Image (cartoon, helix red, strand yellow):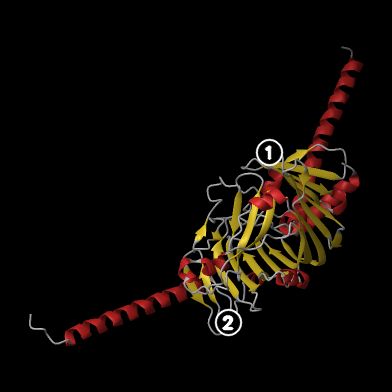
Amino acid sequence: MRPTKLLIAILVISIASFISAHRVFAATDQNSVCNAGGGCSFPCAHGTSGSSEIIPASQLPQCSPQCQSTCSSNNGNANGVCGVFYSYSSWNCDPTAITNSYYIYDYYCSP
Amino acid sequence: MNCQTYLKHCAVALMLLGTIISKCSADSLERAAIAACHDQLQNVVLDCEETRTYNIDPAVAADAPLHFRQPQPDLNRTESSALKFSFLDGNARFERSLSKDTLNYWASKGLPAIVRQIQTISATGRIEELTTQELTNGKRPSFGGFRQLAAFAPDVTIDIALGLRLLGARQWLSDDDLSAMQEVAQRDPSLTILQVKDGSGRVHELHFDSRLLYALVYYRCTNSVGGFVEITNTDFQRIGNTFIPGTIVRSSSVTDSTGQIRHPIVFTISMKKASVNDEKNTLDQYSIWWPAHLELFDARTNDRIKVGPTTRPFTDADIRTQVAATRAQNRSMDQMAAERIRQALESQPSDGH
């Protein structure tokens, strides 16, 4: 190692000596998507599908079966974003192989 | 062996030993420098613009399920949004606002779009999310809620580009993770390349440049069948002793239906403003202030929470308190209803049977 490289390394180490690293922990979750008839499906839950559809928790009230009774239809036109669809070129919803992504629409429903 | 030859052999052995010791300490210093750079990134706030350029294989699009009789999205299109990313010791905040051009694009097709989304992820994996979408009638409803992290959305890029997370990983990268990676030999003396294979068989390769105080300049994730994503960081700007990329490009390479290599979605992130060790980047920035009168959904317990008349954050303790109060109130109402039915039945005249 060149002396300048060593010097830079030591400098960086000394600057960072007071900063500690932290970690984030994960728990359970599933990819899901609104079904037009209500509820959600989990095409990637067992890692055997070639596609996954992810919907944020904040959108779940819009998709939950109990909300479907309050849905307002607009003559078949999409009137609410229900989730985001991703498709993959390999199994297990492998994020290295996204081949498509677009909004999924559904009725706009309120809890 | 004469004395001269013996001494010569000893000298060579000593030289070799010196080289090995020197190499070992150099490697560990490089690792330490990479870890130090990684530590500097534990407190960052970045304002950027993200552009996604789509070039979708028509065969893939033809197979995609379309709900609700929705039209086929354009195979070649560009979407852009303003992205603010904050990170503080394992807490992350992503705030994305769709650009006016992209909003107009969806509106011109008579389709709704997500206008704005804020997502915070605590160090324990608690997610808060507030989404606002623009409907075709011009209304902008918001949805909010809580859930527990299991997987990042597959298109989240900026944290990977900074070296805070590996693609497909559910945890932030730690100094220990970096230490455990294998170093790959290469010709450029200014580069240090680390490599690791994850549990899903993906190989992650990270290139750090000593000329940029060991900032991550290139990342590549290759899956078990050869498909890969690469992220290239360029146009670095120096903030204190940290180099932040001015341009980040993420591109994946997949073989399409015609056997050609295609890059279905290319992400380009342009840095507008960056700060490191910002005093204003405090933990309270990682709690969403929920808009008044919004009903939130807690996907961890399937509870609904009312924000109430004022804009406010919600801790888990706040949620528990409100849920307990609502349940107590419901129980009380149920008891009152049962009592009323009982009284009504008792007050009915007997039919004589």
For the N terminus of chain A, the quadrant is top right
Secondary structure found at label 1: loop
Which of the 4 image quadrants contains residue A26? bottom right
For badge 1, the amino acid type reads Val
Please tell me which residue lies in front, B323 or A48: A48
When asked about the image quadrant of residue B147, the answer is: bottom right
Height in image: B70 above or below B334? above
The earlier-in-sequence mark between 2 and 1 is: 1
Inter-mark Cα distance, 2 to 1: 49 Å
- Residue positioned 85% across, 49% down in the render: B210
In this view of the protein, can residue B342 be seen by the observer? yes
Say which residue label 1 marks: B225
Identify the residue position indicated by label 2 in the image.
B292
Q: Are marks 2 and 1 on the same chain?
A: yes
Tell me which residue sits at (51%, 65%) in the image: B299
On the image, the x and y values in percent for residue A25 come to 58, 56
Depth order, front residue of B91/B255:
B255
Residues packed near mark 2 inside 10 Å, few (<14), some (14 to 19) or many (20 plus) = few
Circle 1 Cα neighbour tier, 10 Å, few/some/many (<14 / 14–19 / ≥20): few
Q: Residue furthest front?
A: A75
Horizontal side of residue B124 vs B186, given as left or right = left
What is the chain identity of the residue bearing mark 1?
B
Coordinates of residue A86 in the picture (x, y in percent): 64, 55
Question: In the rendered image of this protein, does residue B257 appear above or below residue A18?
Answer: above
Q: Single out the residue that lies furthest toward the right.
A: B4
- Residue B175 seen in this snapshot: no
User: Do the numbered discs 2 and 1 sit on residues whose CB atoms are within 8 Å?
Assistant: no
Count every numbered label the image shows and give the total. Answer: 2
- In the image, is residue B160 above or below residue B300? above
